[in-house]
Image: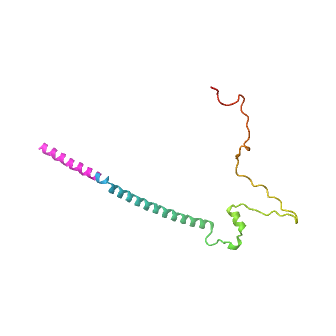
Amino acid sequence: MARIFWMAVGAGAAVWAMNKANDAVQRLTPDSLSGTAARGALHLGDLAKQFAQDVRSGMAEREEQLKDDLGLHGTAVAEPRSAVTRSTRRVLRGEPQYRAISAAPGRPAAALPPARSARTTPQTIEETPRRALPRGGTNRKDH
């Protein structure tokens, strides 16, 4: 009787092991792997969309809190568009401002100061400063 019991246990274990092996083989087929990856990507996209919606709602909520704290609900007054001049827009954008140099009647206008050069290193051999070599000629050891 004990032999029959252990033979049945062994057969059951073999069936269980074969089922597990077949399941693993099915999961590792290219179609199954691509399906799993696609489902994972869709799930990740859904999570990203939900995160973006949460961020937007949090931003709107915080903006309303700031407006309440600062008392800005409908009280802001905007300047008319024509009141903002071109030079004002340049200043706001951080562009350089230029002004005309006027001359006395009959005299030419003064020359503008030279523009600052952006380069800081010499570009030609003539501009390169000469340095004296250390005593003894060169830095190399003579062999």
The quarter in which the N terminus is drawn is: top left
Relative depth, front residue between 110 and 54: 110
Above or below, comparing residue 67 to residue 143 in the picture: below
Relative depth, front residue between 107 and 14: 107
Residue 44 % position (x, y)? 42, 59
Magenta residues span 1-24
- Number of numbered labels in the structure image: 0
Q: Quadrant of residue 112?
A: bottom right
The quarter in which the C terminus is drawn is: top right
Q: Quadrant of residue 84?
A: bottom right
Q: What residue do we see at 36% from left, 57% from top?
A: 34
Q: What residue do we see at 41% from left, 58% from top?
A: 41
Residue, far left: 1
Above or below, comparing residue 115 to residue 135 in the picture: below
Q: What residue do we see at 69% from left, 66% from top?
A: 89
Question: Viewed as shown, does residue 28 lie left or right of 16?
Answer: right
Residue 27 % position (x, y)? 31, 54
On whether residue 36 falls in the magenta region, the answer is no
Residue 55 % position (x, y)? 51, 62
Question: Viewed as shown, does residue 118 lie left or right of 12?
Answer: right
On whether residue 18 falls in the magenta region, the answer is yes
Q: Main secondary structure of the magenta part?
A: helix
Residue 25 % position (x, y)? 29, 51
Question: Viewed as shown, does residue 66 lie left or right of 118?
Answer: left
Relative depth, front residue between 18 and 74: 18
